[in-house]
Amino acid sequence: MATAAEVLGTHTREVPDFPTPGVVFKDLSPLFRDPEAFATVLADIGDRWRGKVDVVAGIEARGFIIGAPLAQAMGVGFVPIRKAGKLPGETHTRSYDLEYGEATIEVAADAFVPGCTVLLVDDVLATGGTAAAAAELIERAGARVTALEVLLELSFLHGRERLPGRELHAIQVD
């Protein structure tokens, strides 16, 4: 039986010069369209965090693809961290710098029971800006980020440095 890291390695496509010249995009579509491979990765994450968190939060958009079925399998709720302007009602909003500009994300102000524990998930950790902003939003909304879980970490971009003191697990590190 293949490990989650092995499955991820054989189900990740590299697309050179996307979205801009010089960037090698890590495409996880092959993983998402293979139900057995995706189930292996979700089971790996679920086994690591089951019973340790109250909620899974996923960062738009691929964090939704991972987070929603993961939360269902773990028997916990799911909270989306959205791009600005996509959520109704009162929200907590955070802008942050990207390597190519600025972005803004938000979470519903009432998304979490105060003090609940959250597993924050996303597909790739690059520079860490999005993950750091999402963790801050979750805590501003009254919850506690237990850990961050990503499928791939691009270590050459030093994203962990923007997440000091936070537990972070990556299934595969490039």
Image: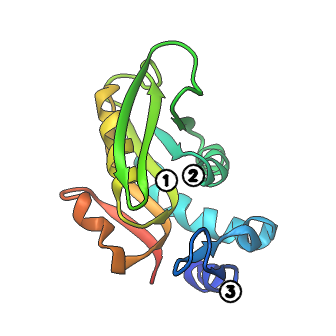
Mark 3 falls on what kind of element? helix
Distance between mark 1 and mark 3 Cα atoms: 21 Å
Q: Which residue is mark 3?
A: 10
Q: Which residue is mark 1?
A: 121
* In front of the other: 58 or 71: 58
- Quarter of the rendering containing residue 4: bottom right
Query: In this picture, is 87 found above or below 67?
Result: above
What's under tag 1, amino acid-wise? Val
CB within 8 Å, label 1 to label 2? yes
Q: Earlier in the sequence, mark 1 or mark 2?
A: 2
Q: Residue at x 53, y 46 (%)?
A: 58
Lateral position of residue 144 relative to residue 105, left or right: left
Mark 1 falls on what kind of element? strand
Mark 1 closeness class: few <14, some 14–19, many ≥20 residues within 10 Å: many
Where's residue 135, x and y in %? 34, 43
- Quarter of the rendering containing residue 24: bottom right
What's under tag 3, amino acid-wise? Thr
Count of labels in the image: 3
Residue sitting farthest toward the left: 165
Lateral position of residue 109 relative to residue 34, left or right: left
Q: Which residue is mark 2?
A: 63
Q: Earlier in the sequence, mark 1 or mark 3?
A: 3
Distance between mark 1 and mark 2 Cα atoms: 6 Å
